[in-house]
Structure formats: structure tokens, C-alpha cells
């Protein structure tokens, strides 16, 4: 163990352009099935086109509210689920990553024979879902996970000895007394000891269980550990201990972390870079300091405001987040955050669903609704039982009951007989743009205008 | 480093303590179970019945050539209980009722152990396949299980045994056909539940194989409901088996409680109550005792309370 911890410093320069992980347009959609025939009636777009890299020895914080797709992304990276689209690359140089990006951006049918072969070769060498057997083993050993619920991730019938020693057994690394020695070493590294070897998980406290979980993840000496909310189930005082432990282990072993959390304050002192996710998409990414000091995206600002110990050094005019994350099976158009964004503009993607979302709690407004004809997400005809109801809706749409930006985006709300035609100005999804070197955000608001 | 005496010492010491920990856990569960008086009653009867079955060749003179056949004492037909040499009396064909009671226990033990072990294996295999493969295979298998479960056990076993013809082996066959389904269903639902637990994900992440995950994580964690059902079935199988024998689907003349009740029932109207009563009582005791123990186990292993231990 001491041997391994000595050379990373020397190799640092050589390894600096090595990416432990590179996500390319990663998507994971879960089919929604209904009825006896289990017909697919929709898709939960849990992760919807995510790209970012993790360097060797680096910590990337993946932040977003619950339901934004963080766990799903972690499961795709660790190989527990296959992505629906896009790819995860492991152990790839920046040069090769750029080549992959370029090749993947060419539509399938337009790739030449040669380009196709080149991409296939890169995929076989680095894409975790297409690795050859030997590379697969290498990846499997080098990417480990610490789950959110330590209790659930430890088999209740196994002793700590079996749990922590198991990875070593699987790869035939140790057996008999050597296995015990190495298991004890691992336990000692996480602050436990040989007196804990022969106990069941339920005999430990929450923090100790998470330590056991970390010891298991360390056993194979991985290069990357995915930490899925490793502290969110713990008491605050215990949280700090676990964070310190993770920090120390990283220093000793040149580990890279993908640190998933819904709480920005947790990753403040841990992460080198932060990726902010909202409804399956990256809305902002950059160096930790930049994210905390110059957040670009209103969602990031709201998250900072929501974090009690951080709120004083951010824009106090930004109110905390209201409501909950919308259903990822029907993400809002344009900027997905526009339904909750305190500074949304008319160009942010207001759509027909927002009419219903925004006016749902208005009494009787939709009572006489008899038919809906959707032309596009931005245009629909709503037919009511009588003309008065249609007029009432039209009046509401022109009143203060809906936000000024939404009213401005509304191109048309005309009543003909019992039918109202609603049409919004169509909007594209908002692209990520570079705001400063290495700092990207997806928001129509121009930072220079502020 | 590997062979330093210190390491070996820790290894041996701790291996020792692993067994102590496991034994202690077993003892704790046993103690919880023994805190329930009805379980204790059931367990006591079960132990006595099994002791009786096991010691049959020593506490009675085994009949020759086949000890499982009732010995016939034609010089003492229909004698009442308390007669010399026939403490519980004899049947109208000179069969010693005590011999039937004791060797009947042995027959019952043989029958129930055989049927339970066969059905557990069949059910666990089929349930595992259904739970793991899912999709059409699962659908077809579970449709079959549902059909089987919709027919009352006794009627179903009776129909099969009747088709196969009267013999002890056919009763075993009929019981196996009827009793495997519950294990398949239990096993399938356990697998579907456990497959989703995070400790399975954890095992996949370290790269363990499907087979080893099945053997190390899934089987041990689905063991208790199977064991509870098996204990209950140890009783139910004897009850259904005796009923089939009583109807005449077994071989006449063997030392089996149902056969004895059937042999003795004609004498009831003439006041010869002992020939059917004692074996009938044994069937009742056997089924009751195993059900009490099964219920006790179920309480101890209740998933809602078990994790707290
Ligand atoms: N196996 C699944 N099947 C269907 N939907 C899922 C599944 N796993 C997650 N989801 C959905 O995907 C979305 C993202 O979930 P998750 O990745 O757990 O988010 P987070 O970890 O950020 O809270 C949620 O709406 C969740 O309901
Ligand atoms: S684009 Fe920017 S301003 Fe518009 S809704 Fe999204 S975050 Fe708010
Ligand atoms: Mg999560």
C-alpha cells in the first residue's frame, strides 16, 4: 500500500492529460409501461444528454435537487445500468476524447468506413459498455461505488469480515490469513479495527456502516470512486468525520471522486470542479471557486441560497426554490428550469403545459374542458362545454394570474365559439455556453447585461 | 508478511470468533422462539414424535420381512386396550395398534421428509428461474403456479393419486406435484425483492459473478420464508397423505396412520373405538405440532422485526 502511494506525485505531470472518466451525451430514459400488455406509453428522461470529464485524482461534485437524475447518472457510470444513448469512456487521453467527440458528432450514416473503424477501436478500448474482457475487468476493479444508504448496501447476513474481504476474494487476491490481514488493514484505514471483523452490519452506527462501505470500495485500490450522497443519511457531526476521512484517503491514494450530493455546502471544500444538474441536464459547470463566487445560472444561485451556511456570500435577492422538480417524463420546453426560475424571460420556453401547470389551482377554470388538440408543445386548441368557460380562460391568460414573461411569450389566445387557440412563441433548448475559461452555463440571460 | 506468526494468530483467533458470533446469533433466535409457550409445546411434541419414529426398531419388535407392514396376531383379533401384549388393543385383522402408532410415525417422517425435500428443490429451482429470467418464461411459469394454487390441495392430490392408482409411491408423487408450487412462488417473490436491494448492486460493482451472487446473497436471504413453509408442510403433508390412505389410495396393510383409521372404522359402531382413535389422534398431533413450530418460526423471522435483531 505504501508503495502505491509514493509514485502518483512523480507521475502527476505525465498523467495530467489522462481522463479517468469522460461522459459523452449520456442519456438514460426509463420506459413507462401501462396496462396488461405493458405497452410503453412514455419515457422518464432521468438523464438527458450529459457530458463532462473527470481527471485522474480529481473530485467532481455533481449537484442538484433530488430527482434530477444524479443517482441514475452514477449507475450508468459504474456500469450498473446501460445508458439509452451516449457513452461513458474510461481511462482515455484528452486527445482521444476529442477524437471521440468529433467522430460521435458525425451522424451515423455519414461516417466513412475509416471513421467507423476508428470509433469502434476507441470504443472497444475505452467505452465501458463495449470493452473487451480484459479491459472490462480493469474498469470493474477501478471504478467503485459508495452508496447513499450504507445499511441497504451491506448484506444483513454477512459479517464485516465477509463484506470488506469479498472484493479481494472475487479477484483471488488473498485468502486465509492474508485475507484477514488485508481486511484488517482496510478497516484500520477507515478508522475501524480488527475488533469489528466479526460483527453484523446492524451492530454498527450509521457512520460506522458508511466506513465499512468505504473500506469495501477501497479494497481493490480503485482509481475512481462514485460517492452517491455518502453523508446525507448521517448526523451533521458524523458527516464531517466521513468527509475528512474521504479527503485523507484521496490524498493518500490519488483517488478521483465523483461526489454526488444535493447539498452544495458538502462539496465546497472537497470538489475541484462542480457540475450542476437540473432535470437530467447540466445547467452549469466550472471550478468550485468560480461556481461559488460567480454563479451564472439562476438554478445554481437558488441552490446556493438554499444552503444555510453559504447564503450570506451570495446574491440575497434570489429567493429560495419554490415547488418541486417537474416530472422528468414531461420536462418543460426551452430551459427546463423556466417553470421555477425567478428571473425567467419570455424567451425561456413557455409552453401549453405551463398554462395548465400555472393555473391548476385556479378554481373551476378547467371544469368544462371537453377536448384538447395539441398541435405542438407550443400550440393547442382547448374546447370547452360552453363559450363562457373559453372566454374565462382567455381573460385569465391576459391577466396578472400568470407571470409577465409568460404573457409576453403568449402569441395568441383567441376564442372561436367554445374553443380557445393558445399559441406560444416556440423556443429551442438552451445550449451551454462558455462564460469564463472552464466555466459553462445554460441560460439565455447574458451575464454582461447584468 | 503472510506467514508471520502474529498474523496467523489473529486469523485463527478471529476465525474462531466468527463461529462464536454466528452461534450466538443462532442462540438469540432460538431464545426468542422459546419465549413463546405455544411454540415450546409444538416443539416438544415434534421432538417426541421424531424420537418415536427414530427409535421404532428398538422399542418394538420389527415385523419380518418388512417392518413397515403391520404384524398380524390372528390369536388376538379385536382385543381392547390393556390386553396382554397389546397395550392399545388390536384391529379386526389382529394388527397391534401400538405397533401401528409407532411405525406410523416412522412412515410419516419418511413421507414428509421425502416430499418436503423434493418439493423445496423443485420449487426453489423453478421459482429462481422465473424470478431471474422474468418476461415470458416467468409469465408462463407463474400462470402454471396460479392454476395449481387455485385447486384445493386435498382434492388435487386425491385426483392425481386416483389416476396413478393405489400405492404408497404414488401418494408421494401426488403430494410432490401438489406441494412444490408454494416454494416456487415464495422463491420468485424473494428473488424479485432481493434483486433490487442495494447490496446486490454492491456485489455487482465489485465484479462478483451472477452465480456467486445467487449463492451468497440471494439464497441465504430468501432461506427463512422457505424454511417456515417447509415446517408447516411437514405437518400438512402427513395430514393430506393420511387422508389419501384413509380413502384407500395407499397399500392395504402398511403401518400408516390413515390406513389404520380406515381399517378400524368399521368397528366403531360395534364399540371398538381404539383401532381408529389412536392413529387418528397421532395424525392430529403431528399436523398440529409442526404447524405450531412453523408459526413460531414465522414470528421470529418476521421481516418487519428481524432486521432489528
Ligand atoms: N428504475 C427506474 N425506473 C423508472 N424511473 C426511474 C428509475 N430510477 C430513477 N427513475 C426516475 O428518474 C428520475 C431521477 O432519479 P434519480 O436518478 O434517483 O435522481 P436523484 O438521484 O438526483 O435524486 C426520478 O424521477 C426517478 O423517479
Ligand atoms: S434560461 Fe435562464 S432565465 Fe430563462 S428560465 Fe432558464 S435559467 Fe431562468
Ligand atoms: Mg439519488
Image (tube, grey):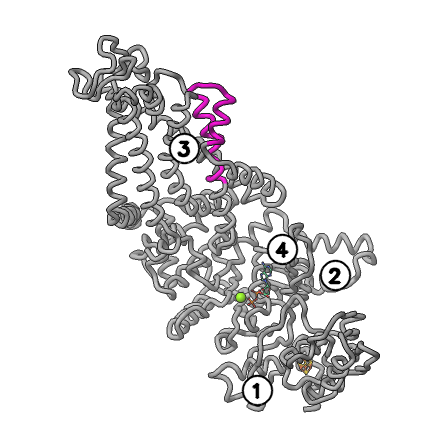
Q: Are marks 1 and 3 on the same chain?
A: no
| Image position, residue A431 (x, y; %) | 72, 75
Residue B13 visible in the snapshot:
no
**Which label sits in the foreground, 2 or 3?**
3
Disc 2 to disc 1, how far (Cα)? Answer: 40 Å
Residue position marked by numbered label 1 in the rendering:
A319
Earlier residue among tags 1 and 4: 4
Q: Residues within 10 Å of mark 2 (few under 14, many from 20)?
A: some
Toward the viewer: A26 or A138?
A: A26
Disc 1 to disc 4, how far (Cα)? Answer: 38 Å
In terms of secondary structure, where does tag 4 sit?
loop
Q: Are marks 2 and 1 on the same chain?
A: yes
Residue A240 vertical placement versus B47 (above, below)? below
Q: Is mark 2 within 8 Å of ligand 1?
A: no
Residue position marked by numbered label 3 in the rendering:
B116
Quadrant where ligand 2 appears: bottom right
Q: Residue at x 54, y 84 (%)?
A: A305
Bounds of the magenta segment: B155-184
| Image position, residue A217 (x, y; %) | 46, 58
Toward the viewer: B92 or A425?
A: B92
Residue position marked by numbered label 2 in the rendering:
A104
Q: Are marks 1 and 4 on the same chain?
A: yes
Q: Residue at x 53, y 68 (%)?
A: A260
Q: Does the magenta portion include A438? A: no
Toward the viewer: B141 or A131?
A: B141
The circle on residue A82 is 4
Disc 2 to disc 4, how far (Cα)? Answer: 18 Å
**Which label sits in the foreground, 4 or 3?**
3
In terms of secondary structure, where does tag 1 sit?
loop
Amino acid at each position: 500500500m505504501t508503495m502505491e502511494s509514493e509514485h502518483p506525485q512523480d507521475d502527476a505531470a505525465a498523467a495530467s492529460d489522462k481522463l479517468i472518466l469522460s461522459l459523452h451525451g449520456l442519456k438514460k430514459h426509463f420506459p413507462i409501461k401501462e396496462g396488461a400488455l405493458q405497452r410503453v406509453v412514455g419515457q422518464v428522461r432521468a438523464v438527458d444528454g450529459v457530458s463532462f470529464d473527470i481527471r485522474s485524482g480529481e473530485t467532481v461534485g455533481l449537484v442538484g435537487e433530488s430527482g434530477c437524475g444524479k443517482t441514475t447518472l452514477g449507475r450508468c457510470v459504474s456500469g450498473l445500468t446501460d445508458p439509452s444513448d451516449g457513452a461513458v469512456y474510461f481511462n482515455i487521453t484528452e486527445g482521444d476524447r476529442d477524437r471521440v467527440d468529433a467522430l460521435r458528432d458525425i451522424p451515423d450514416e455519414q461516417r466513412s468506413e475509416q471513421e467507423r473503424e476508428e470509433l469502434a477501436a476507441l470504443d472497444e478500448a475505452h467505452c465501458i459498455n463495449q470493452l473487451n474482457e480484459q479491459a472490462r475487468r480493469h474498469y470493474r476493479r477501478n471504478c467503485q461505488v459508495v452508496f447513499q444508504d450504507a445499511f441497504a448496501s451491506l448484506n444483513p447476513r454477512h459479517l464485516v469480515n465477509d463484506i470488506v474481504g469479498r472484493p479481494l476474494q472475487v479477484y483471488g487476491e488473498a485468502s486465509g490469513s492474508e485475507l484477514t490481514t488485508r481486511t484488517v488493514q482496510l478497516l484500520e484505514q477507515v478508522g475501524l479495527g480488527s475488533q469489528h471483523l466479526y460483527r453484523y452490519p446492524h451492530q454498527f452506527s450509521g457512520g460506522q456502516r458508511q466506513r465499512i462501505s468505504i473500506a469495501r470500495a477501497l479494497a481493490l485500490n480503485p482509481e475512481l470512486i462514485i460517492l452517491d450522497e455518502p453523508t446525507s443519511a448521517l448526523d451533521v457531526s458524523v458527516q464531517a468525520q466521513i468527509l475528512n476521512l474521504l479527503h485523507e484517503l484521496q490524498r493518500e491514494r490519488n483517488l478521483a471522486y465523483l461526489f454526488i450530493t444535493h447539498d452544495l455546502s458538502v462539496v465546497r471544500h472537497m470538489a475541484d470542479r462542480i457540475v450542476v444538474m437540473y432535470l437530467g441536464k447540466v445547467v452549469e459547470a466550472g471550478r468550485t471557486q468560480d461556481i461559488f463566487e460567480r454563479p451564472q445560472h439562476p438554478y445554481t444561485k437558488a441552490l446556493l441560497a438554499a444552503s444555510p451556511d453559504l447564503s450570506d456570500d451570495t446574491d440575497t435577492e434570489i429567493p429560495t426554490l419554490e415547488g418541486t422538480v417537474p416530472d422528468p417524463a414531461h420536462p418543460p420546453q426551452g430551459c427546463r428550469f423556466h417553470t421555477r426560475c425567478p428571473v425567467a424571460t419570455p424567451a425561456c420556453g413557455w409552453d401549453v403545459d405551463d398554462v395548465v401547470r400555472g393555473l391548476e389551482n385556479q378554481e373551476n377554470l378547467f371544469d368544462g374542458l371537453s377536448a384538447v388538440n395539441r398541435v405542438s408543445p407550443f400550440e393547442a386548441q382547448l374546447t370547452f362545454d360552453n363559450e363562457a368557460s373559453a372566454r374565462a380562460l382567455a381573460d385569465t391568460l391576459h391577466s396578472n394570474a400568470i407571470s409577465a414573461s409568460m404573457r409576453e411569450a403568449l402569441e395568441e389566445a383567441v376564442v372561436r365559439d367554445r374553443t380557445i387557440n393558445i399559441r406560444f412563441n416556440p423556443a429551442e433548448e438552451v445550449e451551454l455556453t462558455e462564460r469564463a475559461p472552464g466555466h459553462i452555463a445554460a441560460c439565455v440571460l447574458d451575464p454582461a447585461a447584468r | 508478511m503472510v506467514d508471520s506468526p502474529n498474523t496467523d494468530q489473529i486469523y485463527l483467533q478471529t476465525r474462531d470468533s466468527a463461529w462464536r458470533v454466528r452461534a450466538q446469533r443462532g442462540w438469540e433466535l432460538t431464545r426468542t422462539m422459546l419465549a413463546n409457550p405455544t411454540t415450546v409445546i409444538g416443539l416438544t411434541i415434534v421432538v417426541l414424535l421424531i424420537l418415536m419414529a427414530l427409535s421404532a426398531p428398538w422399542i418394538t419388535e420389527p415385523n419380518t420381512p418388512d417392518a413397515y407392514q403391520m404384524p398380524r396376531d390372528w390369536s388376538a383379533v379385536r382385543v381392547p386396550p390393556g390386553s396382554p401384549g397389546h397395550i392399545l388393543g388390536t384391529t379386526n385383522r389382529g394388527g397391534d395398534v401400538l405397533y401401528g402408532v409407532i411405525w406410523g410415525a416412522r412412515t410419516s417422517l419418511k413421507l414428509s421428509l421425502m416430499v418436503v425435500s423434493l418439493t423445496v428443490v423443485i420449487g426453489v429451482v423453478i421459482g429462481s428461474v422465473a424470478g431471474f429470467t422474468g418476461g415470458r418464461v416467468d409469465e408462463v411459469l407463474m400462470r402454471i403456479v396460479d392454476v395449481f394454487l387455485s385447486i384445493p390441495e386435498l382434492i388435487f392430490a386425491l385426483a392425481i393419486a386416483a389416476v396413478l392408482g393405489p400405492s404408497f409411491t404414488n401418494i408421494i408423487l401426488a403430494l410432490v406435484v401438489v406441494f412444490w408450487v408454494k416454494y416456487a412462488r415464495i422463491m420468485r417473490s424473494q428473488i424479485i425483492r432481493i434483486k433490487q436491494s442495494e447490496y446486490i448492486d454492491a456485489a455487482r460493482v465489485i465484479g462478483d459473478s451472477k452465480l456467486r451472487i445467487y449463492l451468497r446473497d440471494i439464497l441465504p436471504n430468501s432461506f427463512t420464508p422457505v424454511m417456515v413453509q417447509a415446517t408447516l408442510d411437514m405437518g400438512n403433508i402427513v395430514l393430506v397423505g393420511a387422508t389419501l390412505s384413509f380413502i384407500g389410495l395407499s397399500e392395504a396393510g402398511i403401518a400408516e396412520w390413515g390406513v389404520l383409521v380406515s381399517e378400524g372404522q368399521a368397528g366403531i359402531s360395534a364399540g371398538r373405538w381404539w383401532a381408529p382413535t389412536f392413529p387418528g389422534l397421532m395424525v392430529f398431533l403431528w399436523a398440529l405440532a409442526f404447524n405450531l413450530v412453523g408459526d413460531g418460526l414465522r414470528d421470529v423471522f418476521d421481516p418487519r422485526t428481524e432486521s432489528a435483531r
